[in-house]
Image: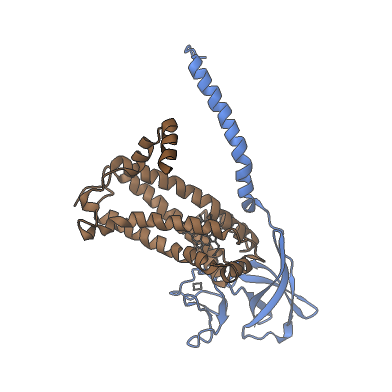
Amino acid sequence: MSNNRVSRRQFLNYTLTGVGGFMAAGMLMPMIRFAIDPALQTKAEGDFVQTSQKIDEITEEPIKVDFTFEQVDAWYKSDVTEAAWVYRDGDAIIALSPVCKHLGCTVNWAGDSAHPDQYFCACHGGRYEKTGKNVPGTPPTGPLDEYEVAEKDGFLMLGKKIPNTLG
Amino acid sequence: MLNKIYDWVDERLDITPIWRDIADHEVPEHVNPAHHFSAFVYCFGGLTFFITVIQILSGMFLTMYYVPDVENAWKSVYYLQNEVAFGEIVRGMHHWGASLVIVMMFLHTLRVFFTGSYKKPRELNWIVGVGIFCVMLGLGFTGYLLPWDMKAVFATKVGIQIAASVPFIGELIKILLAGDAEILGAQTLTRFFAIHVFFLPAVLFALLAVHFIMIRRQGISGPL
Ligand code: HEM
Ligand code: FES
């Protein structure tokens, strides 16, 4: 203990500041936790989604495969249709996400007639090789994401998005 | 009659000094366009405020019809614009004003820059001004999503991607803005609405108050 006596004024200052601090924290804490809840939610991992694409009809030329799933957006449930670019590489089936890694527009295979063997993003002219590798000198800074793939009764199933593994 | 009411209130509350403090002050010759026409550049601050008032009023009235819900947002905007009397005008005021307020604010900033008015002792007010600038851009960004049409959704998608490219905390900013790690949807719309209509206007009022109090304290900067 120090020898300084706590004055009446100091004592009141400390207690009132402390009590005030607790009251402010008690008010703010619930509101802040409320606001940041989305950042702390843990996401249930996505299941595989069935598509209507026959595996043995997939060739080396990428095709667009649409698939539909029920998306739960908080209180709003809806059927969402997304797409993947799918092609065959030997025995493997590759499914790429069409979401541009620049700013999220949608890419199209052979979308630019000057580059018929690349994916093209019309928003800012981003381009990708067939494996999803971004073409240097165009806006995207990374390769297209990949979907996990599986097969069921000869049909293609798509899983969750993972970073591109094809290099 | 009005005089009598004024006197009645003034007698009790002594309001004359208050409104004098607010409204009764010199307009120096070098900022008065009636003296030198080129002084119109000093009007841009006031014009920015004028349009801000229009934004606040028209925005308040828009919320009488607007609903921030993915099913109904677009429909409510369509309804208020096409079915409600003067809807096109009120939405038009808010729509065009949103761009004009940025233009005016930019011209005001240029005036302050080229007259050197940001220099001592007015550095703090420049900083507050930058804060107002950011809040205005935030209002424009969050408001743009509200009509919930294709243009709004994709502009916001791109805007959120830009925010997500911030080093280290980008992903967190993205989730806090969008309300979901993946989806730009129902929670994004309600968040943007809350930010647009409550949070940012509250910050804007505080900053504007500080801005104006400082201007009255320091006066307008001198002639070049
Ligand atoms: C000064 C600041 C403000 C700016 C720059 C601004 C900007 C905008 C913009 C760009 C839009 C999209 C309009 C369109 O595309 O037609 C919008 C919509 C909207 N704003 Fe604001 N806003 C401001 C203040 C406010 C305030 C204070 C309120 C309410 C209290 C408000 C309520 C709304 C509503 C309800 C909409 C959706 C209706 C519609 O899209 O027509 N705004 N705002
Ligand atoms: S979003 Fe694809 S190039 Fe910019």
- Residue B2 sits in quarter: top left
The colour of chain B is: brown
Identify the residue at image location x=49%, y=12%.
A5
Quadrant containing the C terminus of chain A is: bottom right
Q: Position of residue B158 (x, y in %)?
A: 52, 67
Q: Single out the residue that lies furthest toward the right.
A: A153
Identify the residue at image location x=62%, y=35%.
A26
Q: Can I make out residue A167 in this image?
A: no
Q: Position of residue A75 (x, y in %)?
A: 71, 59
Q: Which colour style is shown?
A: by chain
- In the displayed structure, would residue B4 be above or below residue B64? above
Nearer to the camera, A158 or B135:
B135
Q: Position of residue A92 (x, y in %)?
A: 67, 78
Q: Can I make out residue A133 in this image?
A: yes
Nearer to the camera, B45 or B140:
B45
* Figure chain in blue: A
Q: Where is residue B29 in the image (x, y as percent from the top left)?
A: 21, 51
Nearer to the camera, B205 or B8:
B8
Identify the residue at image location x=26%, y=48%.
B27
Q: How many marks?
A: 0
Nearer to the camera, A83 or A54:
A83
- In the displayed structure, would residue A119 be above or below residue A70? below
- In the displayed structure, would residue B13 be above or below residue A115? above
